Image: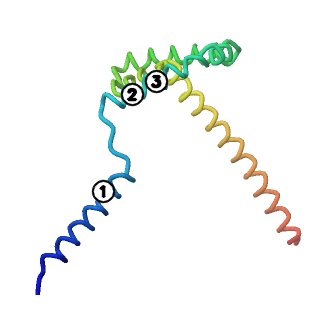
Amino acid sequence: MNLTMPIVVGVVFGLGVYALVRALMPTRRSAIQQVARIDAMRARGSAYETQARAQETGRLGTLRAQVGTRVAEFYLQQGWEQRSLRADLAVLDRSWEKFLATKALLGVRACSSARSCSRWCGRWASARARSSRCGWR
């Protein structure tokens, strides 16, 4: 019995499946291609900078700038450098102070939301307790 022909057919079929999988799966980009892609995205985003800056001139923009400056000074006093985070923000063309201000103001907002929610839940629970004493169900 001749085993050469089934082996050759199997090899050709296997190479065909391998070529099909390689053609359908995307290859990994090199570092140079990735940097070029990020630069192209930044260049496209530069058209929207004037509109974004116009939104930050209001009352919230000045508050955000003041909070960001103070938090950045606090980080500097504590000796916290956050080098990798700053590098990531630089790639995205975002300010360190704006980032810190956003995080601080979101924390304040979350805390105030939690307090108002707990007040509402407390009122609801006390109203529920009063209604159960009266026999309402």
Above or below: residue 119 compared with residue 94: below
Q: Nearer the viewer, mark 2 or mark 3?
A: 3
* Mark 3, residue position: 40
- Quarter of the rendering containing residue 20: bottom left
For residue 85, the mark is: 2
The answer to which of 96 and 15 lies nearer the viewer is 15
Label 2 crowding class (10 Å Cα cut-off): few <14, some 14-19, many 20+?
few
Q: Residue shown at 54%/22% (left/top)?
A: 44
What is the C-alpha distance between the residues marked 2 and 3?
A: 21 Å
User: Tag 1's secondary structure?
Assistant: helix
- Tell me the quadrant of the picture where the C terminus can be found: bottom right
Q: Residue furthest bottom?
A: 1
Q: Position of residue 56 (x, y in %)?
A: 65, 16
Q: Residue shown at 37%/23% (left/top)?
A: 87
Q: How is the image coloured?
A: rainbow
* Mark 1, residue position: 19
The answer to which of 51 and 56 lies nearer the viewer is 51
What kind of residue is marked 2? Leu
Q: Position of residue 98 (x, y in %)?
A: 53, 20
What kind of residue is marked 3? Ala
- Tell me the quadrant of the picture where the N terminus can be found: bottom left
Above or below: residue 14 compared with residue 49: below
